[in-house]
Image (cartoon, rainbow, N blue to C red):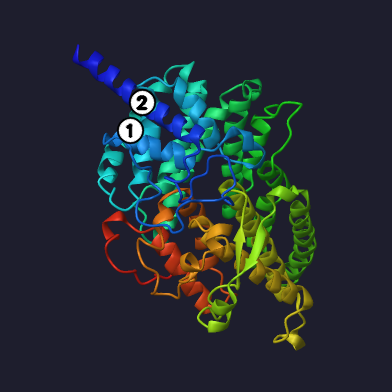
Amino acid sequence: MKEGQAAASAKRTRRNALVMTEEMVLSRSVTQLDCNVNLGKSLVRQRTSPIIRGNKFVPRGLPQDPEQQSLAFFMTNFTHDRRREEIWGGSLEALPTLFKKAEAKSPLTAAVTTTAMGSIAWSPGHSGFRTQSIQIYGTSLKRISESLTDPEQSQSDNVLMAVLMLGFYEVRHPSYANIKSLTLQRSARGLHTKGAVALIKARKPQSFHNQTSLRLYLAVRAQLLGQCIENGDPTPFEDFLAATEGSLPEDFVPSCADHLALLSMSLPKLHLREKRMLDETNIVAKHAAAQNLLKDAQEADLVLDFWTSTVPEEYQFISLPLREDIRKSGIILDMYPQSLDIYCDHPMANTWNIWRIRRINVLRMIMNCADILKPAHSANLPSTEYQNALQIIRRLANEICSSVPFHLGYDKKRFRDRAAFADYPHPPGEAKWPENFAASGAVGGWLMMQPLSFVAKLDCIPETQRDWVREYLTTFMRDPKDMGKGPKSPPLP
């Protein structure tokens, strides 16, 4: 009897949260969600509140029940309108559809709840959700394990989405409060990606010929590709493509993110060749490998550069100069580029930053090859290939930095608002928590972790810029327990 009442109560809680979320989405209540809320509309729009303060990205008027509040927060801030799916390469826009159909004790319900609580725990005043998210995490793993013993459930979108959500939890949970732990974070998420890959391989390719299932397949493919590029190991991705041949329907039209993935499929092999070249001890063999890799890396760079021409005009970003008084004040110097970039929404901003990271990696290959091939008599004179690659890398790194204010909630209106923009960018040590970082608890903070951690490790940008990046990355990853304290000293990556 008690179990039945508990199940009914949980079902009501989930239904109430969904109803409330749908009402907020339909009403476009951006006044209450004016920090990084993406409801399928561009963030370049009018707002009634000029400055981000404290908890304003957590919807006001939410019920006090922790599960309802965290679910409403997560579904509003992190899921995306399906009408904009042509620009989105992830799976979160499929979540509302699957979550509506999920039973109260399903793996997906537990996975979404623990991820939602882990996400809202990043916002000021909500650190208490952290303990509850850890408790429900164990329940999620147990339910997924049990569902894998059922042949029908193990091949369902519900279980696949649950595994992807736990991978998202590993990125968003506030256990990773410093840059060094990002390695552990990527490793933990990688285990969930392996599980998702195994689930997809066990299904028939034709099972992905519907919109929701296809989006999950593409999300897993994109995650696996990213890991193989980072690890320089093409084998897992090649095995995945061979095992899932036929999963794409004949009428498949790639989104901007999907198109980028298609153009990046050669990169894992190139990274493997680069590692072997750098490890080669025979000088003649090393030079031969560098000559071959240089040619192929230059071709790969041209292909990636071509991607920008395939992006429709409405999804291109707008680059705005910083106010003249800020640029002339000298406070930014080399720490921050003298512009601010505005995007149509967060998914597209994320796709642009993924493109920048991949192109920088290819350009670094070109630099390594050029360094090996330079004549001995010109050891101190970088080649033209080296200098050109270096110049482009610095420009791309600047563009990643220029996307930070957008992810913090700045749009065109805030840019024009002198009061709201007077203290940006903040020199290292002068940013204030939580006033300047309130929106980082929502989707913007999540999407900036990988790009900033990548830039923080570049040794070819000014040290002052690296210090600025480290501080912002550290603050994006701030543990809720430290929210009332002053800024941390940025640790080395």
At 36% from the left and 67% from the top, the residue drawn is: 432
- The residue that disc 2 covers is 16
Q: Is residue 277 above or below residue 460?
A: above
- Give the structural element (helix, strand or loop) at label 2: helix
x then y, percent, for residue 354: 61, 53
x then y, percent, for residue 360: 65, 63
- The residue that disc 1 covers is 68
Q: For marks 2 and 1, give the CA distance.
A: 7 Å
Q: Residues within 10 Å of mark 1 (few under 14, many from 20)?
A: many
Q: Classify residue 90 by image quadrant.
A: top right
| Residue placed most toward the observer, 325 or 485 | 325
Residue 143 is marked as none
Q: Classify residue 256 by image quadrant.
A: top right
Q: Is residue 398 above or below residue 381?
A: above
Q: Amino acid at mark 2?
A: Asn
Q: Residue furthest top?
A: 1
In this rendering, position of residue 15 left or right of residue 216: left
Q: Amino acid at mark 1?
A: Gln
| Residue placed most toward the observer, 205 or 56 | 56
At 59% from the left and 48% from the top, the residue drawn is: 345
In this rendering, position of residue 223 left or right of residue 151: right
In this rendering, position of residue 135 left or right of residue 404: left
x then y, percent, for residue 276: 65, 61
Q: Residue furthest front?
A: 48
Q: Earlier in the sequence, mark 2 or mark 1?
A: 2
| Residue placed most toward the observer, 83 or 446 | 83
Q: Is residue 449 visible?
A: yes
Q: Is residue 162 visible?
A: no
At 51% from the left and 56% from the top, the residue drawn is: 407
Q: Is residue 343 above or below residue 209?
A: below
Dot 2 and dot 1 residues touching (CB under 8 Å): yes
Q: Is residue 175 above or below residue 214?
A: below
